Image (cartoon, helix red, strand yellow):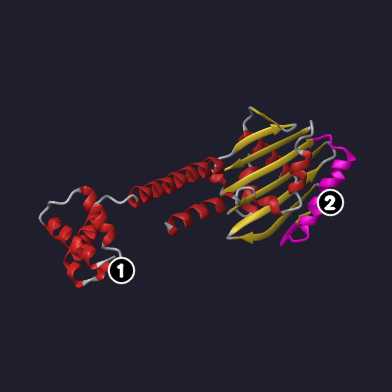
Amino acid sequence: MTQHDLSYWEEIAQRYFLAETTDEEERLLRKFLCTKEAQDARFNEVRATRSYLHVSKAQHTPSVKLPLRALAVAACLSAIAFLGWYQYQQQNVSSVRVAGQTVEADASKLMEQQLAEMFSSTNP
Amino acid sequence: MKKLLTIILLLLGSQLGLWAQKGLAIQAAFDELAVKKNATEVVMSGKRLKEFHLSLFHSLEIKNPSAADRQRISSLVQTDAAQAITKEETPAHNFYELPQHRGTHTYILYRNNGQTLTLIYIEGKASLKQIKQYFQKK
């Protein structure tokens, strides 16, 4: 990049502060400020302004990470709720199977009957 | 996020607790013989057992068991009986209490009167004496 080029960018920078630059010029200025040549002290002000605006915009623009985190938390809570419900269902099992097939029968009654028979010949 | 994952993993781990007899030899009896046409399997857990201070009841009753079935179950019961902390063995029945796990008693009850063979696995806070008292009077 030549001295002339730097003059050109200096002029663009001045116009930038006067809000006379086009979107395309601002895009090119942004790219130029990232180059080695733009480290010249003449561009300190525009570089600081652009940096400030960039950081400020990043801070005040809703982050994409926030909804993702919220979704992750929601997914985890849903998983916990599901597992809690599943565990509750599993813990309240009451089933009778005859020949491997589940049948409609009173499991409590069968349990009491089987245990009564089991303990019928024992001392308390 | 790590806490949530920990909770999920704990919940998943707790699922393994329900069929706790899986580490025992008699699990094979439930797996193999419960499908026989003369077999009745009863599983109960949860609030309906609360009044008896039990958490799991799992039984297998076989009417007119074959000699092979009797031999198989007896062998499996004897395998688990080797680790029993208390035993009550009579010609009519065999009761075994296995080592406690987290304060929960574990019992294997086995009865074979020739016509009916009954294998019961029980978990809970109740002692064997209490269980007898609950069900003998009924």
- Drawn side of residue B24 relative to residue A31, left or right: right
Q: Write the residue at 87% across / 38% down.
A: B66
- The residue type indicated by label 2 comes to Ser
Q: Write the residue at 82% across / 41% down.
A: B113
Quadrant (top left, top right, bottom left, bottom right) of the N terminus of chain A: bottom left
In front here: B113 or A89?
A89
Q: Identify the residue position indicated by label 2 in the image.
A: B75
Q: What residue range appears in magenta?
A: B63-87
Res A124 visible: no
- The residue type indicated by label 1 comes to Lys
The Cα atoms of the two marked residues, 2 and 1, are separated by 84 Å
Question: Dot 2 lies on which element?
Answer: helix
The x, y position of residue B103, in whole percent, is 58, 60
The label on residue A36 is: 1
Chain letter behind tag 2: B
Badge 1, how many Cα within 10 Å: few under 14, some, many 20+?
A: few
The x, y position of residue A86, in whole percent, is 52, 42
| Residue A80 against residue A31 in the figure, above or below | above
- Drawn side of residue A101 relative to residue A31, left or right: right
Q: Write the residue at 27% across / 50% down.
A: A62
Q: Nearer the viewer, mark 2 or mark 1?
A: 1
| Residue A26 against residue B117 in the figure, above or below | below
Most common secondary structure along the magenta stretch: helix
Q: Write the residue at 23% across / 68% down.
A: A3
Q: Is residue B130 magenta?
A: no
Chain letter behind tag 1: A
